[in-house]
Amino acid sequence: MPRRQEWELTLSISVFEAARPVFTGLIVAAMVVVGAFVGHWAHGAWLNDHTPVQPIEFSHEVHAGENEIPCQYCHAWADRSASAGVPSVETCVGCHKGLAEVRDRPEIEKLFGYWERGEGIPWVKVHDTPDFVHFRHKPHIRAGVECQTCHGPVEAMARVTRRVDINEDLRMPWCIDCHTEEQVANGRDCLTCHY
Amino acid sequence: MSKITDTLRQYRADGYFAEFDYHWTMAIDLDQCTGCGACVVACQAENNLPIVGEKRMRQGREMKWLRVERYWEGDYPDARLSFIPILCQQCDKAPCEIACPVFATYHNQDGLNAQVYNRCIGTRTCAVYCPYEVRFFNWFTYTWDEPLEQQLNPDVTVREKGVMEKCTFCVQRINRAKDLARDEGRRVADGEVQPACAQSCPTDAIVFGDRNDTDSAVSRKMRDPRAYEVLKELNTAPSVVYLKNAREPLHAADGGGHHDGANAQAAEPRAAAAEPRMVEAESAVT
């Protein structure tokens, strides 16, 4: 009986040793798979497109920069609501009806296409906060915060881009720093933003 | 350990409550409560509470920030039913706040017991410490079927798996009212903030307001001799005040005879007439 046990033991060890390269391969493969998942998640969460392609190649550089249209002419709800709002197609067409010299440009044709079909323009959101953060535009605008403080120099952007430094910009310490500096009433209370 | 004792000392210190800007308080008149459950439904709708289903309900994983507890007195047909809505008491000396290892629950300057979802790591210690059993844990990420997600309240976070949650005194409404008041350069007026439960109560049994304002409706309710606090002996200093159900105790008037409990005043003249029968009942026992 003991001899038989020894024989079994030697076999099992030798089988394990023979299979060792296979195990290494499996571990490497598993790491690659896990890495792919993590990478995919990180890409979606942190490294997503800061300058998404919009359905119409709308240029803030032309509108807010060259023509000096105030931000709140189009984003009219910024000083009275939580959301700054995206203008209706009617707002765009209201001006562009009278601008015959740019009427035949392809992007303007797209705009009038949406107008004639009675559809909204599916703009892609550039600045977004997580669901557990309730940012409100109204108190910030009324306190005299410039739009550019958070959104960057939009008037110089052909296509709107989000501020890139993920370690500083538009993250909570950045909010808290400003609230502390400006001595906002209850500005450091969690329930001001998180509820 | 020292952190906990520091927190305790801070809570127990004199003048801690005087620092509150507003001291939001709720008064619930149990005499007016009919147990209809409108507050429960309103809370469910306002605060994006999931419907967990029958199976998880049986497992004790229900989500109800506000529940109406029922208490039966006596045996049928001489039974009487009383209700008490139980919600987070927003204790000024809250046991849950001492329990949390990451300070996801804390007391803010308005006397609110805050729960910060993004800071919570889900140890569930607070729920163990809470003597009122009003903290609920998200065991799953609950979802809403296709058209129903349209009724979610955008002002309230939809909680995810692994997060503790509880009644917030509808802080989104408080914040909104404070926002409007600040624009007009004044304090929030009495009755301007109404949590969903108070708004939906058909008998106005629930009154909400600022305790620091001595003329507010809730302060007047608190001065009522019927006012009491649930589990006061635990020294949690709750911000929810209940007004006692002023009814004659069952069987007190006619010694266990047929007694209409809902009509406490009407029973009074009968009390005198019932006296001989009471003696009779006593002799029968001996």
Image: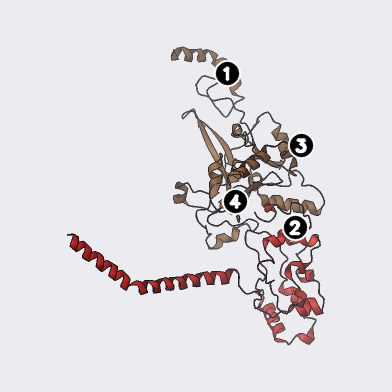
Chain colours: A red, B brown
Q: Do we see residue B211 in this rendering?
A: no
A6 versus B50 height, above or below? below
Instruction: Provide residue B265's location: percent of width, then percent of height.
Output: 62, 25
Tell if the residue under mark 1 belongs to the same chain as the one under mark 2.
Answer: no
Counting residues from the start of the chain, the first of labels 4 and 1 encountered is: 4
Q: Is residue B166 left or right of residue A61?
A: left
Name the element at disc 2: helix
Q: Residue at x 60, y 58 (%)?
A: B151
Which quadrant of the view contains residue A131? bottom right
The residue type indicated by label 2 comes to: His
Answer whether labels 4 and 1 touch (C-beta < 8 Å). Answer: no
Q: Is residue A125 left or right of residue A18?
A: right
Q: Chain of mark 4?
A: B
Name the element at disc 4: loop
Instruction: Provide residue A35's location: percent of width, then percent of height.
Output: 49, 71
Disc 4 marks which residue?
A: B102
The residue type indicated by label 4 comes to: Val
Answer whether labels 3 and 4 touch (C-beta < 8 Å). Answer: no
Q: CA distance from mark 2 to mark 4?
A: 22 Å
Q: B277 or A135, which is in the foreground?
A: A135
Q: Chain of mark 2?
A: A
Q: How many marks?
A: 4
Q: Residue at x 33, y 72 (%)?
A: A19
Q: B141 or B47, which is in the foreground?
A: B141
In the rendered image, the quadrant that contains the N terminus of chain B is top right
Q: CA distance from mark 3 to mark 4?
A: 36 Å
A84 versus B98 height, above or below? below
The residue type indicated by label 1 comes to: Ala
Q: CA distance from mark 4 to mark 1?
A: 58 Å
Disc 3 marks which residue?
A: B214
Tell if the residue under mark 4 belongs to the same chain as the one under mark 1.
Answer: yes
Q: CA distance from mark 2 to mark 3?
A: 32 Å
